[in-house]
Image: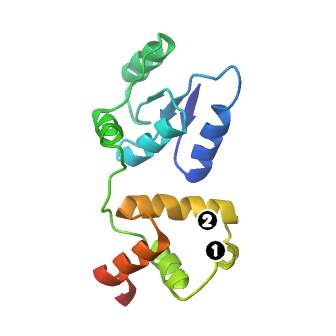
Amino acid sequence: MLLTVRSEEDLDRLAALCCLRPRPLVVALPSADDASLGVRAMRAGARSVVAREASVSALQRTVSATLAGEAVMPADVADLLVAGRAPRGSAPSAEQILWLRRLSDGWTMTRLALETGYSERAMYRLLRAFYQNIGVSTRLEAIMLAHDKGWFES
């Protein structure tokens, strides 16, 4: 099965598919410029990863190898998996900074989720992925980093 992966919803869909029995062989198709999404797809259960923009022959090779029991992925995805992390340090979006600002102001996760239009579960997932991206583990660490980096000043 080929599955385009662009969002948290797509990753949730992938994880749900991989819980089916018999487990389908899923080749995730993230954008070529987002290795972290490829890593997250592999962790969610994809057997292989190839960029959406890949050539037809690359896609055919990936599908053939996957059917033969092999896992195929770009080297940058493999490097990140071996390192045990997603790439860190990309600049947060204005929306992510706003989330942190509101959390630092004492907003609850429930309130933040309601205000942003996400379910509480989706909000937790989005924040967890954001924390991982900036290299922290907790809300407090994220807020402290935001203050240190001056993200709240803009």
What residue is disc 2 on? 123
| Residue beneath the point at 57% across and 58% down | 125
The answer to whether 95 is drawn above or below residue 36 in the figure is below
Marker disc for residue 89? none
Residue at horizontal 64%, vertical 60%?
122
Of helix, strand and loop, which one carries label 1? helix
Q: Position of residue 106 (x, y in %)?
A: 58, 87
Q: Quadrant of the rendered structure where residue 61 is?
A: top left
Residue type, label 2:
Met
Mark 2 crowdedness (10 Å alpha carbons): few <14, some 14-19, many ≥20: some
Disc 1: which residue: 109
Answer with left or right where residue 75 lies relative to residue 120. Answer: left
Q: Position of residue 39 (x, y in %)?
A: 42, 41
Q: Are the residues tagged 1 and 2 within 8 Å (C-beta)? A: yes
Q: Quadrant of residue 54?
A: top left
How far, Cα to Cα, is label 1 from label 2?
7 Å
Q: Position of residue 65 (x, y in %)?
A: 43, 14
**Residue 13 vs residue 100, the one in the foreground:** 100
